[in-house]
Amino acid sequence: MYGNAYIDPNEKSNSITDGEDIQKLNAFESRISNGEKIEPKDWMPKEYRKQLVRMIEQHAHSEIIGALPEGTWITRAPGFRRKLALMAKVQDEVGHAQLLYSAAETLGKSREAMINDLITGKSKYSNVFNYPAYTWADACIIAWLIDAGAIINQVANAKGSYGPYCRALDRICVEESFHLKYGHDNVVTLATGSKIQREMVQAALNRWWPPIMHFFGPSDKISLHTEILMKWKVKMATNDDMRQQFLNMYVPKIWDLGLTVPDSKLMKNNENKWEYTEPDWDEFKRVINGGGPCNAERLAVRRNAEERGRWVRQALLAKDSKYLIPLA
Amino acid sequence: MNQDAIKELLYKMADDLLILGHRNSEWTGLGPILEEDIAFSSMAQDKIGQSQALFEILHSLGEQEPDIVAFMRNANQFHNSQFVELPNGEYDFSTIRHFLFDHADQLRFEMLSNSLFEPLAKLSRKIKGELKYHVFHANIWVTKLGNGNEESHSRMQNALNECWNFALGIFEESQFERQLIEEKIFEGEVELKKRWLENISGILEKANLKIPNTNTWQAINGGRQGKHTPNLQPLLDEMSEVFKIDASAEW
Amino acid sequence: MIKSLDPRVTRSEIDLNNSIDPLKDLDQWETYEAFHQKKRGEQHIHVGIVHAPNPEMALLFAKDQYGRRGITANIWVVKTAHIFMTEYDDQDIFETTPEKIYREAGGYKVMEKINKYRKETKISK
């Protein structure tokens, strides 16, 4: 479950390919424009490696942190069917983290280093998981709409240029289709259920709509940086395009259920584009920088989990172990 | 066949699996390493699924729907051993409980695969592989942590000591023991416990862990008759919190 | 202590300002490459890696990470260190291979010759 890589708009972007071997760069770029994948040991520009590590790592963190808001309801899922399915879904998020950390490792950053950057707050993860899941219906909205957003992003990224990331995403997308169905089924059940259930799900939708609108990130600044990342197939679609795609696919489905989207300006205009109230991007930045309702808790819980597991990991470590960058 | 005897057997098995599956699911997303987190969750799911299957059999014998039975009873109506309701503790406790319980569980189902009560025999044959894997997983973990380093060895030994008398409570005999044996439904708790001790002894020896002295053995019983530790009712309240908002609704 | 919406978290009595020593190298163990065979008779296919401290656990982990859906006949794991690979930079060693049609069935087009011969000698049927 993941939106889009957060690229700092203030990052210097005028010297992305400075100092790169021009012949190698040309060969690299023509491989990508021919639709070929880049593999771990291939030559790649420094900036390509850096952005990919950052993006895949953020994605991995989003999965393991994403297990927390839904995990909030794992001991309270109502009935056998929901209990089993939620366990399987949260398990999948952990599995996705494993796959994505593995893909990022092939670029030379160890899992230990990535986890350290997560728990010290150095690395980012999808903002959406810094919001609380107050009721069971929140977990249902997350499973449907956040996963829906994630699929849009992941399907796009699966066509990117880096082989190991694409392979991980192919596997992940198959599982996400279960999540989406599961989430939709949950929301439909609540929305077509009793009065209390309908109220629960509408309230959850109201709470989650602003984070969902933030999910794909602010409009991309048209910059050389963005252009190059798109040429290198690191970034596969603009944030706005993905948001439009999401609205197009899911707003009608939400309306079908008689639910109200809490944005009075939301409508499709004559040019087939969705218009909406501009999300509060100051809040987005505040949450990204640690000021959201759950940032501190999420990281404290991760630190606690790492610490509680440490004796297990240390006890099992074989003396002759040697870490090598995984192959693929 | 004695329906009361069969129901009692099914209830205690289903409750054990539901409560332990629930406890084990609490580790999901918080496990010691991603890979083990995934593995432990699969086994928790298996347990919940097995429990559901047992409640289905009970339903076919006239009991209420699985969801109602699982989510609407109070602690004093549960027949699980007290062992499974204890909080997870650290991974040492959870792993030892997984080992001790899953060995008993596998043997119980193995014995039941020849039961003259066909629905149970059929289920036992169906889930044979799941149970085999659980024991396989438990054996490797207990052996490796028992032989890991000083800390892991002493943690595992302490956990074993702490779990032991509770684990013996798995084999609390029911009032229907004789009927179950006579009617060839189940060979009984005494036989199960005997085989269990044989099976775990070898593994614990390999794990360099010692079973507590027999003179300290004192099974903590009562769970089969609805007597529980103060841990069970809060677990059930939590588990059914959403379900009870409207037990007649579809969720 | 965190009072969370997640009862599991509340029970764990976690300090919101906890801090831990960073994970050291090899905290997450070595890696094993996992290979999955769907059905007997099919190839084992590389599906990804697991971090594991020994081969036995690598197999447990691979079973649940790569075999928890669909069908599986068999799984292999191999320590990453025990795999040797060609270099992508040397991919050109394979470059002319597809041209060597003398080693392909498609390189032998006997029907053309037979048909020509038949036409010339007017053999019919």
Image (tube, helix red, strand yellow):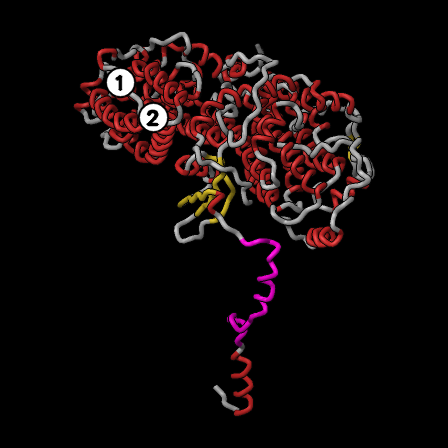
Q: Secondary structure at mark 2?
A: helix
Q: Is residue A135 left or right of residue B165?
A: right
Above or below A262: residue C61: below
The stretch in magenta equals C86-108
Disc sitting over residue B185 in the figure: none
Query: Which corner quadrant holds the N terminus of chain B?
Result: top left
Q: CA distance from mark 1 to mark 2?
A: 13 Å
Residue B171, numbered label: 1
Please report the residue visible at 28 percent of the width from the left and 26 percent of the height from the top: B205
Residue hosting label 2: B102
* Residue C21 in the image, given as x and y percentages of width and height: 56, 21
Q: Magenta span has C94?
A: yes
Q: Amino acid at mark 2?
A: Asp
Residue closest to the far left: B182
Instruction: Report the residue at 22% width, 17% height from top.
Output: B176
Q: Position of residue A42 (x, y in %)?
A: 63, 49
Q: Position of residue B129 (x, y in %)?
A: 35, 36
